[in-house]
Image: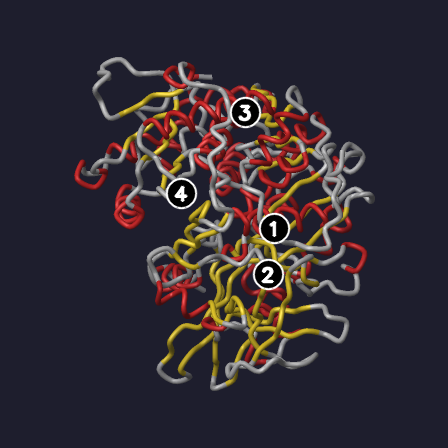
Amino acid sequence: MRIDEPVPNMKTTSCLVHHFLEKNAGLFPTKVAVVHERGRASYSEVNKRANQLAHNLIKAGVRPGDRVVLLCENSIEYVFCYYGILKAGGIVASLNTDIKPEGLAELVKELEPKALVVSSKLEKTVRALDASVLQAARLMVIGPRRAGQSPGDAVLSLPEEAVAQRDANPGLAIDPNSCAAIIYTSGSAGKPKGAMLSHANIAANTRAVIEYLELTSSDVQMVVLPFFYVMGKSLLNTHFAVGGTVVINNKFAYTASVLKQMAEEDVTGFSGVPSTYAHLLFKSPLAQYRDKLPALRYCSQAGGHMPRRVKLELLKILPSHTRLVIMYGATEASARLTYVPPERLDSKIDSIGIPIPGVTMSVMSPEGKQLGPGEPGELVARGDNIMLGYYKNEEATKKVLDQHGYHTGDLGYCDDEGFLFVTGRKDDQIKVGGRRVNSQEIEDKIVESGEAAECIVFGIADPLEGRRLAGLVVPIRPIPDTEKNILAYCAAKLPKFEVPEELRLVDSIPKTSSGKPDRAKSVQIFLESEPKQG
Amino acid sequence: MAGLEIEIRQFIADRFLFGDDRQLGDEDSLLEAGIIDSTGILELINYLEEHYMIKVNDDELVPENLDTIANICAYLSKKTA
């Protein structure tokens, strides 16, 4: 069943994020909303458990606008906790599950949450915090009460206590333009920034994605990305908004088992970031599944630039009926901004596409002048999906939000058909011998050589040249002379000043906590590693 | 099989656990224990292929073959039989 209203006006002023769940709990109560390993939960079950948590949070003192930290791995529990916090009027701050106590302490100090909802696996990270850091925040551990915990402990274990609570929707009157979620995003430098997304931001983006992906209640999404990423939450919200199903698989390391489950569950959509697809392409039996995934309508990709070769190989290897949808966005935009209509991918293979419904993209000069086709500048976005600002960081907010919109920090241009192209990051420019280098193009070439699954290129300080080009490469398979072969390929294809001087092989490219390639960390790893002898 | 189990255990301990495998049971999921992820699995595969002269096929990348020490041993016995 399709969301029936036409969407000429993207304003969704009356919609709250948890309404997606509540509406479909009413329409399709027994429909399976989430699958995780052997567990299956219907819309009404998820809604009931979310309501129980919401009532618990309200009872614990959570009021609209209070922050609630969610620290939980992808699971059915995550889903009802996410919506439960929203139903209680809380602002959900879903943190990276790899967070260490030091990092958690910093964020808790900034967020001053009223409560922390934590899975039993991650309880020890929270327990490692000083009592003074937690202060009055209630700690709720998802799982049965453990022996030794007294009722007086400031710990509430779910779901036992939850069962005693009411099942009905709290139905709080919440301003759709108020903050619903804080999602931390970090560049390579500086402390993480919490992008504040309102209910209206998320709802607007959800509807736009539903429209261009043509999502319906028949859609079944395979989720291998963490929900704590904005993209993971978008997969959840979009499928809940249409009454679809979300299949959670946390064992992507075992790609064969993920593909098997996709076939068994008639998965219609798969989403990944560039390293997901590198892994799927080079270390999975995807080719053998070409005829075994008749339901797979599309694969979508976001989370940064994916090398051209990987896109081309995917187009060859995926079932012929499966569309590849390349997308671009930013956490600050809830997150989707542009997409490449799959039927245009062939001719726009390097493009990030056209704006999604309700979004306008401009290319602007540093002086704020709107630029025309072919003229390079910064990509600036406007739309109902643009964040409210960064939490407690007015300075950082002012740097990216102004009367023109959200300054993405990405440089690029628009072609005469309105298709956008990204050429690099504003703050990541590498200059070698005084000449600006397009790192994305070089990285594409390295992968094009056929010996690299992923790579990253950067400038290393050099006394003579100012900067010299180097890179880290994840080889597809360990064969001798990989670095030499790749460099020879680049030398044949690129101008001399764009050929890296040295490449080192690594198992993986370091990522920031938002999953983006971490250039600064990569430089560090390069400098600390030994060059190959001989 | 005991010899195989000792070797695998040693590799995992050295490579992923800083030499300390006391807490790792034969039936413990390497993925759930956070010992292995998409990158770690490739290292494990490289080790198995080089050390035992086998080829881990893409369609064998399932937890039943690789996610516990016991599973790895059973898988290796099958492959080298």
Tell me the tag on residue A383. Answer: 2
In the figure, is residue A445 to the left or right of B63?
right
Which of A349 and A13 lies nearest the eye of the viewer? A13
Q: Are dots 4 and 1 on a single chain?
A: yes
* 4 or 1: mark nearer the eye: 1
Point out the frontmost of discs 2 and 4: 2
Density class for disc 2 (Cα within 10 Å; few <14, some 14-19, many ≥20) is: many
**Label 2 or label 3, whichever comes before in sequence order:** 3
Q: Residue at x 59, y 52 (%)?
A: A274
For disc 3, the marked residue is A46
Label drawn at residue A260: none
Q: Position of residue A319 (x, y in %)?
A: 79, 42
As measured in the structure, the alpha-carbon distance from the residue carrying label 3 to the one carrying label 4 is: 21 Å
- Pointer 3 local density, CA inside 10 Å: few below 14, some 14–19, many at least 20: many
The amino acid at mark 4 is Leu
Chain of the residue where label 1 is placed in the rendered structure = A
Q: Which residue matches tag 1? A: A204
Amino acid bearing label 1: Ala
Residue A15 in the image, given as x and y percentages of width and height? 58, 43
SS assignment at label 4 = loop
Residue assigned mark 4: A95
Figure label count: 4
Distance between the alpha carbons at the discs numbered 1 and 3: 23 Å
Residue A488 seen anywhere in this rendered image of the structure: no
Q: Is residue A483 above or below residue A245?
A: below
Q: Earlier in the sequence, mark 1 or mark 2?
A: 1
